[in-house]
Every structure is written in C-alpha cells, then in structure tokens.
Image (tube, helix red, strand yellow):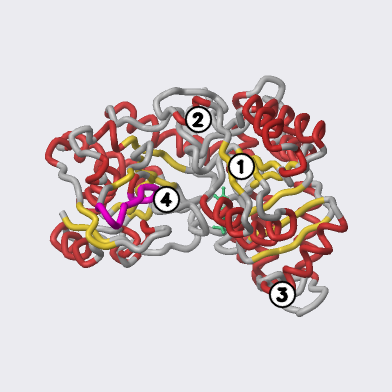
Amino acid sequence: MAARSIIEPFRIKSVEPIRMTTREERERYLAEAAYNAFLLRAEHVLIDLLTDSGTGAMSSEQWASIMRGDESYAGATSFYHFEAVIHDVFGFRYVLPTHQGRAAERILFSTMCKPGDVVPNNTHFDTTRANIEYVGARAVDLPIPQGRQPATPHPFKGNMDVAALEALIADVGAARVPLVMLTITNNSGGGQPVSMANVKAVHGICRHHGIPLYIDACRFAENCWFIRQREAGYEDRSPREIARELFGYADGCTMSAKKDGLVNIGGFLASNDETLARAESRLLILTEGFPTYGGLAGRDLEAMATGLQEVLHEDYLRYRIASTGYLGRRLTEIGVPIVQPPGGHAIYIDAAAMLAHVPARMFPGQALVAELYLAGGIRAVEIGSVMFGTTDLQTGEEATAPMELVRLAIPRRVYTQSHIDYVCEIVEDIFVQRSQIRGLRMVWQAPPLRHFTARFER
Ligand SMILES: *Cc1c(COP(=O)(O)O)cnc(C)c1O
C-alpha cells in the first residue's frame, strides 16, 4: 500500500532556534510595538507568517552555489550561468538582474510608459501599482468577478476578466496601453492561479492590438503546479514544460526571486526585445549596477540560478501546495472563514466574517493579528482597512476597505507540519473565544503605506 501522506521532501542540515515567550512578555512587546506587528522585533516572534518574500530556506546546493559566486565586476561567470537558466526556464533572450522585483518594475515602466497611459493587470501588486503611478500612468485591476468574493470557490480565481480587458482597450484606445500584465499567482487576489487558457486568451487580445504582454512571475512555479493539477491536458506535463508554454505567450516578465527564486534577495527583468533591453540597461547602470550583476553579488546570481531550477522539482511543488492547502483545510474544519480555495503561498482569514461584532473602523483584521501574537507568538499581516483604508484628516472619518483579511503567508521550506499544527491550535483557541475580541483605535498614522508604521490602542 502506498503511503498517503505528502511529506517535506528534505531533511534538516542546519537549524535556527526560535524562542518561546510568555503571554506577559508578549503583552509588553505588543504594547511597545503599538499593536502593530511590523514594529515587533523578529526575535520576539515564534512563528513568523508576515510574508513569504525573502524568508525561505536555501538548499545545500544553493549554499554551495554561494561559494561558486564569481565577484568580477564585468563579465562574471555567475551572470552567464544565471542567464542560461533564464533562457532555459523562461525562454527570454535578454535578461537584466535587479536587486528585487520592484527595481525591475521601475525600469520596465520608466522605459515603456508615459503619463496618461493605462496598464491593465489581473490585480496589481502594491509596488507594481506604485511604480506605474509614479510615471504618471494608470494601473487598472481586471480580475474575474469571483476574484473579489472570498467565499466563492473557483479553480482559477486569479484569472483576468478578458471581456473587461477588451472593453478597456476599446475605451482608451490601444495606443494608450503600452503593455498588459498578468500576475501569476495573483498575490493581492489571494495567491490564486491563472489558467493557461486565460493566459492564451489575454495573449490573443494583446496580439490583435499589437500590445506586449508581460508576466509578473513572482510565483510562476506555484501557478504552473495549479495548472497541472486543475487544467485538462496538463496532468502529465512537467512544471518546466508548463512554464515554457506559459512564458511562450508573453513578451517579457518581471520577477522578485524572493518568492519562487527560493532566495533571500534578487530579481530580474526579461524580454525578447533588443531595442527595449538596451534602453533598460541604461537605466539599470544608472541605479542598479553594471548589466552583468545589476545590484547583486555574483553569489546571489548563483543562488538564484540554482533556486529557479529547484523550485520546479515536482516533489517540492507537491509538498508546497499541499502544505498551504493543509493549513486551509484545518482552519475550514474548525469553522474559520477563509478565502476559498486556499492559494499557493498563503491562507487569508476573513476577519470581517470571523469578528462580525467588530466594525471595520475598529480594524477587525488588525485586532486578529494582535490576538494571534498574544495567544501564540504568531506574526501575520492585516490586509484590510489598515492597509487600504484612508482617514479624512479634516473630519476624522474612515474610508474602509472592501475586505478585512488577515494573511498567514508560508515561508518556503522553513516550517514543518508540527509548526502548522501549532498555528491551527492557536487559531482554534482564538476562534472559540472570538466574541471577546475587541477592536483597536488608530492613534497615529503616516500615509501613504500607513500600515507599516501606524500605532494603535486597545
Ligand atoms: C513581492 C512582489 C513584487 C515586488 O517584489 P519585491 O522583491 O518585494 O520588490 C511584485 N509583484 C508581486 C506579485 C509580488 O508578490
């Protein structure tokens, strides 16, 4: 009989202790941090689910790659190694290494966009939107309707609404749309995948209008695994083959390798357009570095080259998606309302539904984040009215966000199943006593991006 359990496909060679704290200590630390988890010291956190960005564990092969890094200023061997992996995995001819995703975004949008342009995406990530707006263009989100409904399941909830894309292009004119983007998986929409059929449909529209299609590729491997699991015709294809087909429909991509690059820092911008790549190189040299290192050390390029291949291993992806699904399934069994179905890198608790007695202006998501830390030393992040709401500084009136979510992001290859079981037990305790949870008052803020520094009182 074959075993049914999907286990961590690695054993542990180096360990990093995490420190238990008492409830009294956590009360003090959180009060000192003004009830904002971003202001906590990491050493006071037991299980850190703040983000999956740059928080993963590298493999022994990646650490070996670090030693092979060629630190030559120009023409480093590590660059050619990295470039060969990009050609092989993504198929793009020109690649510019950047220190992380947002640097690739800044270079791309500064080169391709002008004021008054419109850039559609299934859902823009916040740095993507900010970089588009910075050059005077407009970032438009076009998710399918199910993408905005937390409780509605859909196999490819990250898809773009292609009818809305056609309508937008007809409305503003193709000349004002310098590129279309697809974010895989759709991070801000709950880590939900985009289907190959949707990528093809968007590609078809873009080609018809002569508009380049770019992929925000941060979690491309997780997206490819969902395609293999859920889309007819892909069940026997390898993640690498699926990735090559998917990127074959695109003209370029940006990537934060801090996600599916399995590294702690790094990113890149890639395309097939020589003229464009030349213009982008000029900007790269201005602010990032010479084109064969672009703001990274040679060793970082080596670690990325190895990580981008490891992330496509079937055992890894099976474990990765199953472990996120496990947390989602256990929380659902307890009765905790989450965004359905579970995404690739995180579980999103619907705090508005769970804490229905706390009004949005008293930040139910932030109150739940505080409770997770107090009860179990777990750090999560609010994605609701703290992050996306605004205060009218004249009247003090709060404009609240459409959803009040709390994200539990899972770092890659870092926590074991017993860590996740612990998280489930803490959430269950909180869920049972949820009627006693009180809201928070924001007493200080510094917009924009106020969530990083806002201060609260109970
Ligand atoms: C993280 C992320 C980015 C930005 O990357 P950084 O490395 O944080 O600059 C862009 N898009 C998506 C979808 C992301 O998740």
Give whichever of discs 4 and 2 has the lower sequence position.
Answer: 2
Marker count (numbered) = 4
Q: Amino acid at mark 1?
A: Thr
Badge 4 is on which residue? 415
Give whichever of discs 2 and 1 has the lower sequence position.
Answer: 2
Give whichever of discs 4 and 1 has the lower sequence position.
Answer: 1
Task: Identify the secondary structure beneath mark 1.
Answer: strand
Q: Which mark is residue 183?
A: 1
Badge 2 is on which residue? 147
Contact between labelled residues 1 and 3, with CB atoms less than 8 Å apart: no
Q: Nearer the viewer, mark 3 or mark 1?
A: 3
Task: Identify the secondary structure beneath mark 4.
Answer: loop
Instruction: Pinpoint residue 236: horizontal percent, then vertical percent.
Output: 71, 26
- Neighbour tally class for label 2: few under 14, some 14-19, many 20 plus, Cα within 10 Å: many
Residue drawn at x 35%, y 61% is 38
Q: Nearer the viewer, mark 4 or mark 2?
A: 2
Q: Is mark 1 within 8 Å of ligand 1?
A: yes
Task: Identify the secondary structure beneath mark 3.
Answer: helix
Badge 3 is on which residue? 286
Give whichever of discs 3 and 4 has the lower sequence position.
Answer: 3
Foreground pick, 265 / 2: 265
